[in-house]
Image (cartoon, rainbow, N blue to C red):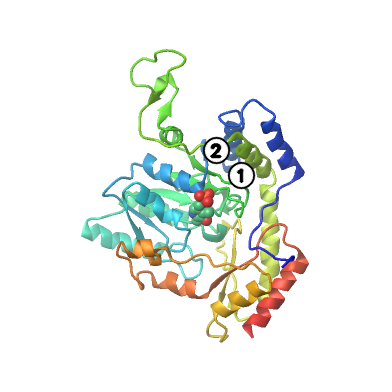
């Protein structure tokens, strides 16, 4: 198994390592200058005013919900085809979750299903406070349409862009928050750029930024203009709300800042791999990713569907065959509403038919910038064997 090909892998350069070592030799391992520097670079890259770095996208989703006022009795909607963190953030706040079925072509939350569900929710008198569209595989959701619905029905929008840093929507960077209140990125090593663990929440709204900055560090402020009453002196801080320790370290931020310089190249390399897969898979009984012309995907994942009308091979047998050959295929994702934790809240099979059909057929092939032609050829050759 020396030649195991994973489904995703980070690219760490000597420059990245040097930047981290520089922090290790400096005075600050945390709460130093590297975190604000990474935040500034990321905000500038995305074309947005505020960026709040945290220790994971999960933490970013949690404080994003809290900053938008999500609490007990509230309702948050998201896509069933995502990592569980997209839904769990609402549960941390004591809110209820519901799922909007996916679009059968993009696998993102379906705007038609969202519109229908909103209209029914309005009749029943229980509209969501927040909707969390997820840019699955790095392909942006139909944000302009979601924004129009948010204006009409009054919900807030958090983009879960954990897959999508470096992607674009209508020729602008994902993360600029033109169509949303807050956008969240993940810097886990399988994602597009990494800080080991890490995440970020971006927003154009200064009050939301201030609230998230406070929430990531115990609910504490050291800014006298944010305090209630007078400051007692230079040592003084105030805890205004119940926050957390969700801070990113300076070592992580230095790595992220260094990686960000190569982000566009990483995404271009992923597109090169995707086009090569598209060409090589054209005659196989699989459905390759469909790309909406409004978007430029960050291509975090390359997901194919095994087409049951054109092969008798099951997804299970294809998955097992590839894994046995040392190819780290994966499945993204198990529909969240079918997880035991969510079933226990009342969700059942059949709640999201498109998502469940997708799950039965989906397979993520290895996709990362350092994937070599020969490795990709091996993946396709073994895949073809498994399908016949
Ligand atoms: C990876 C991921 C997360 C969680 O990211 P962490 O940084 O690991 O907390 C959330 N949502 C989606 C869609 C993800 O893929």
Q: In this view, does 135 lie to the left or right of 278?
A: left
Which residue is tagged 2? 248
- The tag earlier along the polypeptide, 2 or 1, is 1
If the image is split into quadrants, where does the C terminus sit?
A: bottom right
Q: What residue sits 36% from the left and 62% below the top?
A: 342
- 149 over 66 or under it: above or below: below
- 127 over 331 or under it: above or below: above
Q: Determine if residue 204 is in view.
A: yes
Q: What residue sits 64% from the left and 25% below the top?
A: 27
Q: How many marks?
A: 2
Q: What residue sits 43% from the left and 26% below the top?
A: 221
Residue 170's x, y, as percent?
55, 53
Q: What residue sits 43% from the left and 56% below the top?
A: 145
Residue 220's x, y, as percent?
42, 28
Q: Nearer the viewer, residue 304 or 139?
A: 304
Which residue is tagged 1? 195
Q: Which of 52 and 248 is in front in this view?
A: 248
Q: Is mark 1 on a helix, strand or loop?
A: loop
Instruction: Tell me if the residue at label 2 has its CB under 8 Å from ligand 1.
Output: no
Q: Nearer the viewer, residue 240 or 257?
A: 240
Residues at marks 2 and 1 touching, judged by CB atoms closer than 8 Å: yes
In which quarter of the view is residue 278 placed?
bottom right
- 281 over 236 or under it: above or below: below
Judge the density around disc 2: few (<14), some (14-19), many (≥20) Cα neighbours within 10 Å: many
In which quarter of the view is residue 307 placed?
bottom right
Judge the density around disc 1: few (<14), some (14-19), many (≥20) Cα neighbours within 10 Å: many
Q: Determine if residue 114 is in view.
A: no
């Amino acid at each position: 198994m020396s030649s195991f090909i994973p489904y995703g892998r980070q690219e760490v350069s000597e420059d990245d390592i040097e930047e981290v070592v520089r922090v290790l030799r400096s005075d600050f391992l945390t709460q130093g200058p590297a975190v604000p520097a990474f935040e500034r670079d990321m905000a500038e890259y995305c074309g947005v005013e505020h960026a709040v770095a945290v220790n994971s996208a999960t933490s970013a989703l949690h404080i994003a919900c809290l900053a938008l006022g999500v609490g007990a009795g509230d309702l948050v909607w998201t896509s069933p085809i995502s990592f569980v963190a997209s839904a769990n953030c609402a549960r941390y706040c004591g809110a209820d979750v519901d799922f909007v079925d996916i679009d059968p072509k993009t696998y993102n939350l379906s705007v038609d299903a969202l519109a229908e569900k909103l209209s029914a929710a309005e009749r029943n008198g229980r509209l969501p406070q927040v909707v969390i569209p997820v840019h699955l595989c790095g392909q942006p959701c139909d944000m302009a349409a979601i924004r129009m619905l948010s204006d009409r029905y009054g919900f807030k929008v958090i983009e879960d862009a954990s897959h999508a840093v470096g992607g674009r929507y209508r020729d602008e960077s994902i993360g600029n928050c033109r169509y949303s209140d807050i956008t969240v990125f993940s810097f886990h090593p399988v994602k597009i750029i990494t800080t080991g663990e890490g995440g970020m929440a971006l927003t154009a709204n200064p009050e939301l930024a201030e609230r998230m900055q406070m929430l990531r560090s115990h609910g504490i402020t050291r800014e006298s203009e944010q305090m209630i009453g007078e400051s007692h002196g230079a040592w003084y801080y105030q805890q205004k709300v119940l926050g957390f320790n969700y801070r990113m370290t300076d070592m992580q931020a230095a790595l992220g800042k260094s990686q960000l310089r190569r982000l566009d190249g990483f995404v271009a390399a992923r597109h090169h791999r995707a086009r090569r897969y598209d060409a090589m898979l054209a005659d196989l009984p699989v459905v390759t990713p469909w790309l909406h012309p409004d978007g430029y995907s960050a291509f975090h994942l390359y997901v194919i569907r095994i087409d049951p009308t054109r092969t008798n091979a099951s997804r299970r047998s294809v998955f097992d065959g590839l894994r046995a050959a040392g190819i780290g295929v994966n499945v993204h994702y198990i529909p969240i509403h079918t997880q035991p934790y969510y079933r226990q809240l009342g969700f059942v099979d059949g709640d999201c038919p498109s998502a469940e059909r997708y799950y039965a057929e989906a397979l993520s092939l290895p996709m990362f910038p350092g994937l070599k032609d020969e490795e990709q050829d091996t993946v396709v050759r073994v895949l073809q064997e498994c399908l016949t």
